[in-house]
Structure formats: C-alpha cells, structure tokens
Image (cartoon, helix red, strand yellow):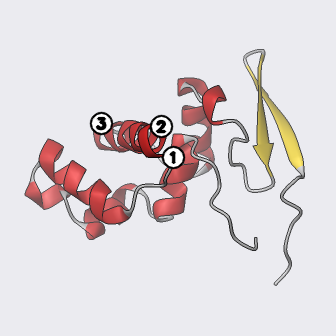
Amino acid sequence: MECFDPTVSQMLTLEAKQYLLNHKKYLKDFSEWDEQIRDWLASQEGIDLTPEHLHTVVFLRNSFSNNRLHPVIRKITEELAKKFGKEKGTIKYFHELFPGGIHQAYLIAGLPMQDSCC
C-alpha cells in the first residue's frame, strides 16, 4: 500500500474563499468549515444533503468541538434515533446516508482526518 505525505496540501477556492485540504480532501483547519465547503465536499462524495445529513453533520461538529474526539457510530445512531425516530437510529440507515461510512461523514463535517498510515 502506498502512503501519502500528510503534510501535502492543496488549496481550493470557492467563491473567492480559500480552503486548505489535505491529500484526501479533509479540511486542514476545523475552524475554516462552513456551509459552502460542506456542500462542495458532499457533492464531491455524490451526496445530496437531506435534513438527516445536516443534523448528523452538526452533531459531529458539536461533539468534536466539545470533546476533541471523533464521535463513534453508536453515538451518532443514538442521536439519529432521538431526532428522527427509532427506525432511523440504525447503522444500516447511517450507511444509507453515508455510503462511504463514518469517515465520509467526518470529511463532510470538516473534522480532521484521524491519525493512520494513509
């Protein structure tokens, strides 16, 4: 497996605002996230944002802001169940929202990339 240098970045400009992204399109600065980059990242991932997506993204950002930890999927599904009903509080439903899994949700929410090899 080829690993990439995590220090490599690219600059993205959307409507005159610049965003610094890493080699996997994760936002380098959590505080630079806004609706514009959220929508762009979602479109790059092929996701049309629904109220359930938006609620999940806000939950992820608030959880990360408060704890400086990436929320685990169990906490996310509990939150979805609380807000949208038991039938939407499942891992299966979460994967319908984010087919790329938890890391896709983290990416769209502007959370930093978790430490790993690549």
Instruction: Tell me whether circle 1 and circle 2 mark residues in contact (CB < 8 Å).
Output: yes
Instruction: From the image, tell me which residue sits under label 2.
Output: 65
Query: In the displayed structure, does residue 91 sit left or right of residue 4?
Result: left
CA gap, disc 3 to disc 2? 21 Å
Above or below, 2 relative to 78: below
User: In the rendered structure, which disc, 3 or 1, sits on the residue that comes first in sequence?
Assistant: 3
CA gap, disc 1 to disc 2? 6 Å
Above or below, 32 relative to 53: above
Q: Position of residue 15 (x, y in %)?
A: 72, 17
| The quarter of the displayed image where residue 53 is located | top left
Residue at the location (90% across, 52% down)? 8
> 62 or 22: nearer the eye?
62
> 112 or 9: nearer the eye?
112
Could you tell me the amino acid type at mark 3? Pro
Task: Specify whether residue 38 is in view.
Answer: yes
Task: Specify whether residue 46 is in view.
Answer: no
User: In the rendered structure, which disc, 3 or 2, sits on the residue that comes first in sequence?
Assistant: 3
Instruction: From the image, tell me which residue sits under label 1.
Output: 68
Q: Which mark is residue 117?
A: none
Q: Position of residue 92 (x, y in %)?
A: 28, 69
Asked which secondary structure carries label 2, the reply is: helix
Residue sitting at the far left? 86
Could you tell me the amino acid type at mark 1? Arg
Instruction: From the image, tell me which residue sits under label 3.
Output: 51
Could you tell me the amino acid type at mark 2? Ser
